Image: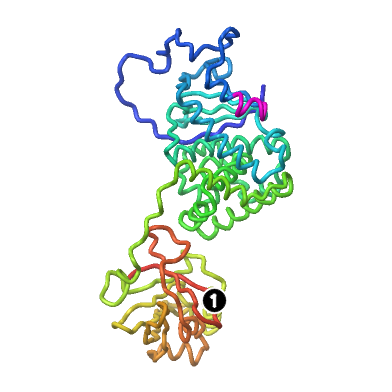
Amino acid sequence: MAYKNILTLFILLVLTGSACNDPYNDIDGKNPDYVTNDNERQPTELDNWLRSNFTVPYNIQVKYRWDNSELDPYKNLTPPAVNKVQGVMDVVKKVWIETYNQVAESNFIKEYCPKQFVLVGSANYNYDGSMTIGTAEGGRKVVLFVVNDFNPADNGNIKQLIHTVQHEFGHILNQNIAYQPEFKEVTAGNYTANWSSVSLAEARARGFITSYAMASTDEDFVEMIATMLVEGKEGYERILACETNATSRALLKRKEQYVVEYFQEKYKIDFYALQTKVQESINAIAPGDPVEEPTPLFDIWGYDKDSTAIRFDFNFYSYPSGFATAFFTDFNLLARKGYGLDTYFRLFYSAENQMTLQLHYHTNGPGERIYYVANYYFEVYHGENDVFGFAYVGNDENGRMLAEDYGVYNVLDFFAGYTYKIEWERTSCPGSNLVGFYPASTPNEGYTYGILGN
């Protein structure tokens, strides 16, 4: 039996009443568009277009006339609507073939492409509530389902189609040259046959780019390829910024590194260049919706506004190294004195042009834990080019003790005496409320960010 790789997406099936007609089998048997194995049939304009764009240059047969022997005979499937075929294959040509032609060696597609595409109108529904939208068999044949739903003016439709093609082509490349065995160790032990019951959010929190990536290491590798290509650098980085945690983000970055190295070392392809070309090609056909611009920060953050504070929390966010070093230096200094520095703290407006840095700490050791608050006060000035500065003007007694007696002043120094551009965090997601502090002068060790609050 031919080895099969199957791309499957989880869907929720809703049962509704229906009429007695069978939409899968109500096909007019006399309609010549669905005739196959007819040697007497003259080629149509579509046949000639497919031949000149796929068969002649790449030896790829595109089979759209119905032939049930190519498919699972136990599934109810719909033939493709003929008026959808050229639109689908034109996108395949422009976004898959032509982008590889631009970055790979001249004979790459000819050497590694599947030799047959079979088109099916409907999805291939599975018993577990999922549907198959593409398969690849032994590096020879790719089956594309849901052709009848394709809209070439819809950016999402194009991404779904190309995701399927890139996924299946990834399997073909892996069958020719295996990917690095080290990839299998990145999230070893977390793969499951029950991937369809795992939400996308949970999958990404566990270090997988999609739920289906959890099916096996092979599916994981090609899902990384497909997702990075169809989302492009900006979209992929937004996924990492918005939908992962520090641990899962690091796992996905390791997987990304293996994918990039695989393409370079095994096929001499600059993966990031390919990613750019694919994204340009998708957007040239059907531009995606622009990312919604957030509300101007200072319309909602400031004294007597919706949000007066910025909250920092090392339990929930992975901070840049300079800021993290400052915090953990203070954390360790205070621990030597028998205290624990809480991993969250605030910087908030206490007056129109005044801010307070508020640290929380507590006793360690036996007995009842005692909690304390240390406050540090700043005058805020707004300079040219929207640069902000924090002039340190004082502290309360707890703040004095930490800074002067215990040497816990590194977080304080991070804000005091420097100037910053303060704006929405430059890699944040829409609605994330992350605010970035970007140094406008030196010396300083990088930027930091926090979340709006009160």
- Quick check: 267 above or below 127? below
Position of residue 399 measured from the top left corner of the image (x, y, whole percent): 42, 87
The question of residue 55 being in magenta is answered with yes
Position of residue 336 measured from the top left corner of the image (x, y, whole percent): 55, 83
Q: Residue furthest left?
A: 304
- Quick check: 190 above or below 117? below
Secondary structure mostly taken by the magenta-highlighted segment of the chain: helix
Relative to residue 88, is residue 300 drawn left or right? left
Q: Secondary structure at mark 1?
A: helix
Residue in front for this viewpoint, 153 or 333: 153
Q: Which residue is mark 1?
A: 328
Residue name at image x 42 percent, y 38 percent: 153
Relative to residue 35, is residue 24 drawn left or right? left
Q: Looking at the figure, which quarter contains the N terminus?
A: top right
Residue 86 in view = yes
- Quick check: 95 above or below 403? above
Tell me the magenta residue range: 51-59
Residue 127 in view = no
- Quick check: 297 above or below 367? above
Mark 1 surroundings within 10 Å by alpha-carbon count, few (fewer than 14), some (14 through 19), many (20 or more): some
Residue in front for this viewpoint, 274 or 134: 274
Residue name at image x 50 percent, y 73 percent: 447
The question of residue 210 being in magenta is answered with no
Q: Quadrant of residue 332?
A: bottom right
